[in-house]
Amino acid sequence: MTDSTTKPVPYLTDPTGREHLLSSEITTIGRALENDIVVTSKRVSREHARLRRDGWRVILEDLGSTNGTFLNDERVLEPVALHDGDCIKIGDVALAFHDPDITYRDTFLPTLEVDVAAGVVRLDRRVITLSSKEFVLLAYLHARSGEVCSKDDIAAAVWPEYQADVYDYQVENLMRRLRTKLEPDPANPQMLLTIRGLGYKLVGRG
């Protein structure tokens, strides 16, 4: 989608496929007819949420709605910047966020969050389910992001109960499983890199 100057404009699509341009500085969403995007559902507050343009970013804010605003199935408790492909849920209506300008300014790498205390991993703010060993491996690499980690060091960190009785194929298989959950193309990894003869390295945005 573009505006009158041909610059790409972010937009939302509703369940009917209709596109809602976010060309104004503020776009409001709610049940009341005064809103820019009207959602006629009893689960939607009169003034439910708003989208605010901040430079090239679009910020989503809940306006104290009764049933909450959700971003990728997590309740929005504070203003949050949107990414292309995000799913916004207003009451029982899902809206998809699209940013046509993403190819001009974003890197390919997704944003990775590893919350060790909570045992939660998010990739572009979507929760990823990992096995216990996959989580330990990722947490170890994440703590050393950008550094090359040898298979021996990984084995000691992930399988401390086995001491020295961990084989390379176990590390390789675990890395392969982790890649299938994090990499868009596991056969061509962009985040979990193999450094031939040395080990593995995690790169990305966090």
Image (tube, helix red, strand yellow):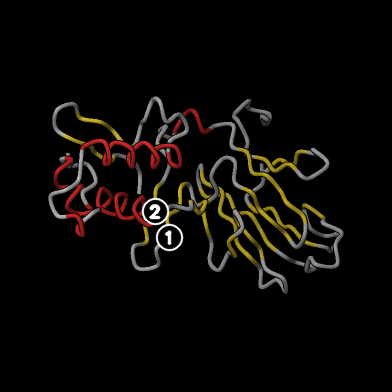
Q: Amino acid at mark 1?
A: Val
Q: What residue is drawn where x is 36% and y is 36%?
A: 176
Crowd tier of the residue under label 1, counting other residues whose Cα lies within 10 Å: few below 14, some 14–19, many 20 or above: some
> Which residue is more in the foreground, 177 or 31?
177
- What kind of element bears circle 1? strand
Asked which quadrant contains residue 161, the reply is bottom left
Q: Is residue 150 above or below residue 33?
A: above
How far across and how far down the image is residue 30, in percent? Answer: 77, 61
Asked which quadrant contains residue 93, the reply is bottom right
Q: Is residue 141 left or right of residue 1?
A: left
> Which residue is more in the foreground, 147 or 3?
147
Q: Nearer the viewer, mark 1 or mark 2?
A: 1
How far across and how far down the image is residue 177, in percent? Answer: 40, 40
Q: Is residue 192 above or below residue 28?
A: above
Q: Is residue 141 left or right of residue 183?
A: left
Q: Quadrant of the N terminus?
A: top right
For the residues labelled 1 and 2, say whether their Cβ atoms are less than 8 Å apart.
yes
* Residue holding disc 1: 120
Q: Amino acid at mark 2?
A: Glu
How far across and how far down the image is residue 75, in percent? Answer: 60, 65
* Residue holding disc 2: 113
Mark before the other along the chain sequence, 1 or 2 = 2
Q: Residue 129 has which mark?
A: none
Q: What residue is drawn where x is 62% and y is 50%?
A: 25
- What kind of element bears circle 2? strand
> Which residue is more in the foreground, 48 or 163?
163
